[in-house]
Image (cartoon, rainbow, N blue to C red):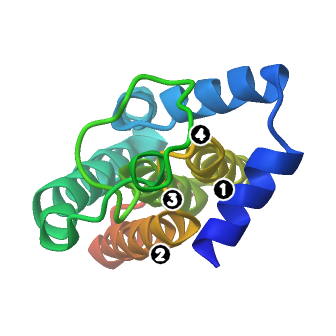
Amino acid sequence: MDLTILNFVREHLQNDAADVTAQAFSFLGGAVIWLIAAGALCFFKNYRIYGVALALAVLLTLALTELAVKPLFMRERPFITHDFPLVVKEPLGSSFPSSHASQSFAGAVTLFGARRSWGVCAVVFAACVGFSRIYLTVHYPSDVLAGAVLGTAIGFAAVFAVKKTGIDKRR
């Protein structure tokens, strides 16, 4: 199924404009953009706790994917296994799960907890980041799905922790 989806994307969706768009989403979907968003939230008293939760969710997701799950599975990336051409710099590390997807979904779910309208935009952004990783053939669809599930779970845990502490200042 993974290979069928990758081949469909390569054969039917790839073009120069989509290459640039996918590269942009992939670049923006890393931890740095989410940590910048977390820092920005910290400037607003009513959202400060969500800024902290966002930073912690993204950092925890990054640590889990890069230090625990990826070394456990060591799945080769699709461009290596199937000799797909790359339009980006070769990423380091193994393929499963997608760190970009996990960080983006952790961030999106945490933002959703802070404010639904932000969360909806962030979920769409996270989905675009995940798709960009497939489009660029640096991840299998199952890598992105696993990353999305992991990030969503951590994002929900971060929001739950904020709600449980009772220090949500958005009243």
Distance of label 4 from label 3 (alpha carbons): 19 Å
Q: Quadrant location of residue 106?
A: bottom left
Looking at the rendered structure, the secondary structure element under dot 4 is loop
Name which residue type carries label 1. Answer: Val
Sequence-first tag of 2 and 1: 1
Q: Which mark is residue 149?
A: 2
Looking at the rendered structure, the secondary structure element under dot 3 is helix
Distance of label 1 from label 4 (alpha carbons): 20 Å
Q: Residues within 10 Å of mark 1 (few under 14, many from 20)?
A: many
Q: Nearer the viewer, mark 1 or mark 4?
A: 4
> What residue is at 24 percent from the left and 60 percent from the top?
65
Circles 1, 4 touching at the beta carbon (< 8 Å): no
| Residue indicated by mark 1 | 123
Instruction: Find residue 22 and report its horizontal and vertical position in percent.
Output: 67, 32
> What residue is at 34 percent from the left and 35 percent from the top?
91
Instruction: Classify residue 116 as left or right of residue 130.
Output: right
Q: Residues within 10 Å of mark 4 (few under 14, many from 20)?
A: many
Distance of label 4 from label 2 (alpha carbons): 20 Å
| Residue indicated by mark 4 | 136
Instruction: Find residue 92 and report its horizontal and vertical position in percent.
Output: 25, 38
